[in-house]
Image (cartoon, rainbow, N blue to C red):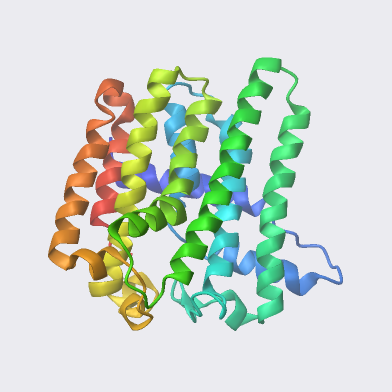
Amino acid sequence: MNFKNELKEYQEIIETELKKYIEKNESPEKILNQSVEYSLLAGGKRLRPILVIATYRIFKNDFEKCFPYAVAIEMIHNFSLIHDDLPAIDNDDIRHGKPTNHKKFNEYTAILAGDSMLNNAYLIISKDLISTTNNNERNQKIKAFNELTIAIDRVIAGEYVDTESEGKNISKEKLKYIHENKTGAFLRACVRIGAILADVTDNDLNKLTSYAEKIGLAFQIKDDILSEEGDEKVTGKPVGNDKNKKKCTYISEYGLSKSKEILENTIEEAVESLKDFGEKAEFLRELAFYIKNRNK
Protein backbone atom coordinates (compact mmCIF):
# COMPACT_ATOMS: atom_id res chain seq x y z
CA MET A 1 0.00 0.00 0.00
CA ASN A 2 1.23 3.47 -0.90
CA PHE A 3 -0.18 5.57 1.92
CA LYS A 4 0.36 8.97 0.29
CA ASN A 5 -1.40 7.91 -2.90
CA GLU A 6 -4.31 6.38 -1.02
CA LEU A 7 -4.62 9.46 1.18
CA LYS A 8 -4.71 11.67 -1.91
CA GLU A 9 -7.40 9.47 -3.48
CA TYR A 10 -9.53 9.79 -0.36
CA GLN A 11 -9.04 13.56 -0.33
CA GLU A 12 -10.11 13.79 -3.97
CA ILE A 13 -13.24 11.75 -3.23
CA ILE A 14 -14.17 14.12 -0.40
CA GLU A 15 -13.50 17.21 -2.54
CA THR A 16 -15.75 15.83 -5.29
CA GLU A 17 -18.56 15.06 -2.87
CA LEU A 18 -18.34 18.44 -1.12
CA LYS A 19 -18.63 20.32 -4.42
CA LYS A 20 -22.02 18.71 -5.02
CA TYR A 21 -23.43 20.69 -2.11
CA ILE A 22 -22.08 24.13 -3.04
CA GLU A 23 -24.93 26.50 -3.90
CA LYS A 24 -24.16 28.35 -7.15
CA ASN A 25 -27.57 29.78 -8.03
CA GLU A 26 -28.17 33.51 -7.99
CA SER A 27 -30.04 34.46 -4.82
CA PRO A 28 -30.26 37.29 -2.27
CA GLU A 29 -27.93 35.27 0.02
CA LYS A 30 -25.27 34.89 -2.70
CA ILE A 31 -22.50 36.31 -0.48
CA LEU A 32 -23.43 33.90 2.31
CA ASN A 33 -23.09 30.98 -0.13
CA GLN A 34 -19.71 32.31 -1.24
CA SER A 35 -18.65 32.46 2.40
CA VAL A 36 -19.63 28.81 2.85
CA GLU A 37 -17.72 27.80 -0.26
CA TYR A 38 -14.68 29.83 0.80
CA SER A 39 -14.23 27.82 3.99
CA LEU A 40 -15.55 24.45 2.85
CA LEU A 41 -13.26 24.24 -0.18
CA ALA A 42 -10.25 25.95 1.43
CA GLY A 43 -8.31 22.69 1.55
CA GLY A 44 -7.25 20.92 4.71
CA LYS A 45 -6.43 17.31 5.42
CA ARG A 46 -10.03 16.00 5.23
CA LEU A 47 -8.96 13.64 8.01
CA ARG A 48 -12.38 13.31 9.62
CA PRO A 49 -14.42 12.15 6.61
CA ILE A 50 -11.51 9.94 5.56
CA LEU A 51 -11.63 8.20 8.94
CA VAL A 52 -15.32 7.38 8.38
CA ILE A 53 -14.69 5.79 4.97
CA ALA A 54 -11.42 4.05 5.84
CA THR A 55 -12.93 2.47 8.96
CA TYR A 56 -15.96 1.26 7.01
CA ARG A 57 -13.70 -0.29 4.36
CA ILE A 58 -12.08 -2.60 6.89
CA PHE A 59 -15.36 -4.52 6.85
CA LYS A 60 -17.21 -3.67 3.61
CA ASN A 61 -16.46 -2.42 0.11
CA ASP A 62 -19.58 -0.38 -0.73
CA PHE A 63 -18.15 2.71 0.96
CA GLU A 64 -20.33 5.07 -1.10
CA LYS A 65 -22.94 4.52 1.61
CA CYS A 66 -20.70 6.57 3.91
CA PHE A 67 -20.66 9.65 1.68
CA PRO A 68 -23.59 11.54 3.29
CA TYR A 69 -21.99 11.12 6.72
CA ALA A 70 -18.50 11.94 5.48
CA VAL A 71 -19.75 15.15 3.84
CA ALA A 72 -21.84 16.10 6.87
CA ILE A 73 -18.86 15.58 9.17
CA GLU A 74 -16.60 17.81 7.07
CA MET A 75 -19.28 20.50 7.03
CA ILE A 76 -19.59 20.37 10.81
CA HIS A 77 -15.82 20.46 11.18
CA ASN A 78 -15.64 23.61 9.06
CA PHE A 79 -18.52 25.14 10.98
CA SER A 80 -16.48 24.66 14.16
CA LEU A 81 -13.37 26.19 12.56
CA ILE A 82 -15.22 29.32 11.43
CA HIS A 83 -16.67 29.86 14.90
CA ASP A 84 -13.37 28.95 16.58
CA ASP A 85 -11.60 31.72 14.62
CA LEU A 86 -14.09 34.44 15.58
CA PRO A 87 -12.93 37.46 17.64
CA ALA A 88 -14.97 36.32 20.64
CA ILE A 89 -13.15 32.98 20.80
CA ASP A 90 -9.63 32.60 19.30
CA ASN A 91 -9.61 35.82 17.27
CA ASP A 92 -7.49 34.30 14.50
CA ASP A 93 -6.73 36.09 11.25
CA ILE A 94 -5.25 33.20 9.23
CA ARG A 95 -6.54 29.71 8.42
CA HIS A 96 -4.93 27.42 5.80
CA GLY A 97 -2.64 30.31 4.88
CA LYS A 98 -5.57 32.56 3.94
CA PRO A 99 -7.66 35.16 5.80
CA THR A 100 -10.16 33.56 8.17
CA ASN A 101 -13.80 33.72 7.11
CA HIS A 102 -14.70 36.73 9.23
CA LYS A 103 -11.67 38.59 7.85
CA LYS A 104 -12.50 37.72 4.24
CA PHE A 105 -16.18 38.63 4.59
CA ASN A 106 -17.35 39.99 7.96
CA GLU A 107 -18.26 38.67 11.37
CA TYR A 108 -22.01 38.20 10.93
CA THR A 109 -21.53 36.51 7.54
CA ALA A 110 -18.97 34.13 9.04
CA ILE A 111 -21.30 33.22 11.92
CA LEU A 112 -24.17 32.53 9.55
CA ALA A 113 -21.92 30.58 7.15
CA GLY A 114 -21.00 28.30 10.05
CA ASP A 115 -24.66 27.97 11.01
CA SER A 116 -25.51 27.14 7.40
CA MET A 117 -22.95 24.34 7.24
CA LEU A 118 -24.17 22.85 10.51
CA ASN A 119 -27.76 22.87 9.31
CA ASN A 120 -26.87 21.49 5.89
CA ALA A 121 -25.08 18.61 7.57
CA TYR A 122 -28.34 17.68 9.29
CA LEU A 123 -30.26 18.10 6.03
CA ILE A 124 -27.92 15.72 4.20
CA ILE A 125 -28.25 13.03 6.85
CA SER A 126 -32.02 13.44 7.21
CA LYS A 127 -32.47 13.02 3.44
CA ASP A 128 -30.33 9.88 3.53
CA LEU A 129 -32.40 8.46 6.39
CA ILE A 130 -35.66 9.17 4.55
CA SER A 131 -34.39 7.38 1.43
CA THR A 132 -33.22 4.27 3.35
CA THR A 133 -35.86 1.54 3.16
CA ASN A 134 -33.97 -1.36 4.77
CA ASN A 135 -34.87 -1.33 8.47
CA ASN A 136 -31.55 -2.71 9.75
CA GLU A 137 -29.58 -0.29 7.62
CA ARG A 138 -31.74 2.60 8.76
CA ASN A 139 -31.22 1.63 12.40
CA GLN A 140 -27.43 1.67 11.91
CA LYS A 141 -27.67 5.11 10.33
CA ILE A 142 -29.77 6.39 13.24
CA LYS A 143 -27.11 5.12 15.64
CA ALA A 144 -24.45 6.86 13.55
CA PHE A 145 -26.43 10.09 13.59
CA ASN A 146 -26.79 9.86 17.37
CA GLU A 147 -23.02 9.36 17.62
CA LEU A 148 -22.50 12.54 15.62
CA THR A 149 -24.85 14.68 17.71
CA ILE A 150 -23.17 13.52 20.93
CA ALA A 151 -19.77 14.46 19.48
CA ILE A 152 -20.94 17.96 18.53
CA ASP A 153 -22.19 18.49 22.07
CA ARG A 154 -18.79 17.46 23.44
CA VAL A 155 -16.88 19.67 20.98
CA ILE A 156 -18.92 22.68 22.11
CA ALA A 157 -18.28 21.82 25.76
CA GLY A 158 -14.56 21.38 25.16
CA GLU A 159 -14.32 24.64 23.26
CA TYR A 160 -16.05 26.47 26.09
CA VAL A 161 -13.78 25.07 28.80
CA ASP A 162 -10.71 25.75 26.64
CA THR A 163 -11.69 29.38 26.05
CA GLU A 164 -12.78 29.89 29.65
CA SER A 165 -9.44 28.50 30.90
CA GLU A 166 -7.17 30.86 28.95
CA GLY A 167 -4.59 32.50 31.20
CA LYS A 168 -5.43 30.24 34.15
CA ASN A 169 -3.54 27.45 35.87
CA ILE A 170 -5.57 24.29 35.43
CA SER A 171 -5.15 20.69 36.52
CA LYS A 172 -3.89 17.90 34.27
CA GLU A 173 -7.36 16.38 34.55
CA LYS A 174 -8.98 19.53 33.18
CA LEU A 175 -6.45 19.74 30.34
CA LYS A 176 -7.24 16.12 29.48
CA TYR A 177 -10.96 16.97 29.56
CA ILE A 178 -10.44 19.85 27.11
CA HIS A 179 -8.45 17.72 24.67
CA GLU A 180 -10.78 14.72 24.89
CA ASN A 181 -13.79 16.86 24.08
CA LYS A 182 -12.60 19.74 21.90
CA THR A 183 -10.61 17.54 19.50
CA GLY A 184 -10.87 13.91 20.53
CA ALA A 185 -14.66 13.55 20.63
CA PHE A 186 -15.12 14.36 16.97
CA LEU A 187 -12.31 12.08 15.76
CA ARG A 188 -13.67 9.35 17.98
CA ALA A 189 -17.11 9.80 16.43
CA CYS A 190 -15.71 9.58 12.89
CA VAL A 191 -14.18 6.16 13.49
CA ARG A 192 -17.22 4.92 15.40
CA ILE A 193 -19.61 6.16 12.70
CA GLY A 194 -17.68 4.25 10.02
CA ALA A 195 -17.79 1.13 12.19
CA ILE A 196 -21.47 1.53 13.08
CA LEU A 197 -22.45 2.00 9.43
CA ALA A 198 -20.59 -1.25 8.70
CA ASP A 199 -22.62 -2.96 11.46
CA VAL A 200 -19.59 -4.31 13.34
CA THR A 201 -19.62 -6.36 16.53
CA ASP A 202 -19.39 -4.65 19.91
CA ASN A 203 -15.92 -6.16 20.36
CA ASP A 204 -14.63 -4.64 17.13
CA LEU A 205 -16.29 -1.33 17.92
CA ASN A 206 -14.50 -1.21 21.28
CA LYS A 207 -11.11 -1.83 19.66
CA LEU A 208 -11.69 0.85 17.06
CA THR A 209 -12.91 3.25 19.73
CA SER A 210 -9.64 2.76 21.60
CA TYR A 211 -7.72 3.56 18.40
CA ALA A 212 -9.85 6.65 17.82
CA GLU A 213 -9.38 7.98 21.33
CA LYS A 214 -5.62 7.61 21.03
CA ILE A 215 -5.32 9.37 17.67
CA GLY A 216 -7.68 12.09 18.93
CA LEU A 217 -5.33 12.81 21.81
CA ALA A 218 -2.29 12.51 19.54
CA PHE A 219 -3.77 14.96 17.05
CA GLN A 220 -4.20 17.65 19.70
CA ILE A 221 -0.76 17.08 21.21
CA LYS A 222 0.76 17.44 17.74
CA ASP A 223 -1.24 20.64 17.22
CA ASP A 224 0.21 21.97 20.47
CA ILE A 225 3.73 21.05 19.33
CA LEU A 226 3.25 22.71 15.92
CA SER A 227 1.98 25.85 17.63
CA GLU A 228 5.28 25.91 19.51
CA GLU A 229 7.80 25.03 16.81
CA GLY A 230 6.00 24.69 13.46
CA ASP A 231 6.75 26.59 10.26
CA GLU A 232 4.16 29.31 9.66
CA LYS A 233 4.59 28.97 5.89
CA VAL A 234 3.62 25.31 6.17
CA THR A 235 1.04 25.35 8.97
CA GLY A 236 -0.77 28.33 7.48
CA LYS A 237 -1.28 29.94 10.88
CA PRO A 238 0.91 31.92 13.29
CA VAL A 239 3.38 29.93 15.40
CA GLY A 240 3.40 30.82 19.09
CA ASN A 241 -0.26 31.78 19.05
CA ASP A 242 -1.16 29.44 21.91
CA LYS A 243 1.62 30.84 24.11
CA ASN A 244 0.71 34.44 23.28
CA LYS A 245 -2.92 33.81 24.25
CA LYS A 246 -1.87 31.89 27.37
CA LYS A 247 -3.87 28.87 26.26
CA CYS A 248 -3.70 25.65 28.25
CA THR A 249 -1.81 23.09 26.15
CA TYR A 250 0.35 20.02 26.57
CA ILE A 251 3.37 22.28 26.05
CA SER A 252 2.37 24.65 28.84
CA GLU A 253 1.66 21.72 31.17
CA TYR A 254 4.38 19.18 30.30
CA GLY A 255 6.95 21.04 28.23
CA LEU A 256 8.00 20.34 24.64
CA SER A 257 10.23 17.30 25.22
CA LYS A 258 7.75 15.46 27.46
CA SER A 259 4.89 16.27 25.07
CA LYS A 260 6.79 14.62 22.22
CA GLU A 261 7.35 11.55 24.39
CA ILE A 262 3.64 11.37 25.26
CA LEU A 263 2.81 11.73 21.55
CA GLU A 264 5.10 8.83 20.64
CA ASN A 265 3.59 6.55 23.29
CA THR A 266 0.04 7.50 22.35
CA ILE A 267 0.61 6.61 18.68
CA GLU A 268 2.10 3.24 19.67
CA GLU A 269 -1.00 2.51 21.75
CA ALA A 270 -3.26 3.52 18.86
CA VAL A 271 -1.51 1.16 16.46
CA GLU A 272 -1.66 -1.66 19.02
CA SER A 273 -5.45 -1.30 19.14
CA LEU A 274 -5.62 -2.35 15.47
CA LYS A 275 -3.58 -5.57 15.73
CA ASP A 276 -6.58 -7.89 15.37
CA PHE A 277 -7.70 -6.33 12.07
CA GLY A 278 -4.61 -7.40 10.10
CA GLU A 279 -3.76 -5.91 6.73
CA LYS A 280 -7.24 -4.44 6.28
CA ALA A 281 -6.40 -1.79 8.86
CA GLU A 282 -3.05 -0.86 7.33
CA PHE A 283 -4.29 2.54 6.16
CA LEU A 284 -5.49 3.41 9.67
CA ARG A 285 -2.10 2.38 11.06
CA GLU A 286 -0.29 4.58 8.58
CA LEU A 287 -2.73 7.38 9.34
CA ALA A 288 -1.70 7.27 12.99
CA PHE A 289 1.95 7.78 11.99
CA TYR A 290 0.86 10.54 9.60
CA ILE A 291 -0.76 12.36 12.52
CA LYS A 292 2.45 12.06 14.53
CA ASN A 293 4.74 13.21 11.74
CA ARG A 294 2.60 15.87 10.03
CA ASN A 295 3.97 19.40 9.72
CA LYS A 296 0.65 21.23 9.43
Residue toward you, 293 or 91? 91
Residue 43 visible in the displayed image = no
- The image position of residue 40, as x and y in percent, is 59, 61
Q: How many marks?
A: 0
Residue toward you, 203 or 121? 203
Q: Report the residue at 49% width, 40% height from top.
A: 189
Q: Is residue 43 left or right of residue 276?
A: right
Quadrant containing the N terminus in the rendered view = top left
The image shows residue 71, relative to residue 55, as above or below, that is below
Residue toward you, 13 or 51? 51
Residue 44 visible in the displayed image = yes
Tell me the quarter of the picture where residue 126 sits: top right
Q: Report the residue at 54% width, 46% height from top.
A: 151
The image shows residue 248, relative to residue 238, as above or below, that is above
Q: Report the residue at 73% width, 25% height from top.
A: 132
Tell me the quarter of the picture where residue 55 sits: top left
Quadrant containing the C terminus in the rendered view = bottom left
The image shows residue 247, relative to residue 152, as above or below, that is below
Residue toward you, 179 or 235? 179
- The image position of residue 72, as x and y in percent, is 62, 47
Q: Is residue 144 left or right of residue 247?
A: right
Q: Is residue 27 left or right of residue 224?
A: right
- The image position of residue 155, as x and y in percent, is 52, 54
User: Residue farthest to the right?
Assistant: 28
Q: Report the residue at 69% width, 67% height from top.
A: 113
Tell me the quarter of the picture where residue 162 sits: bottom left
Q: Is residue 158 left or right of residue 79?
A: left
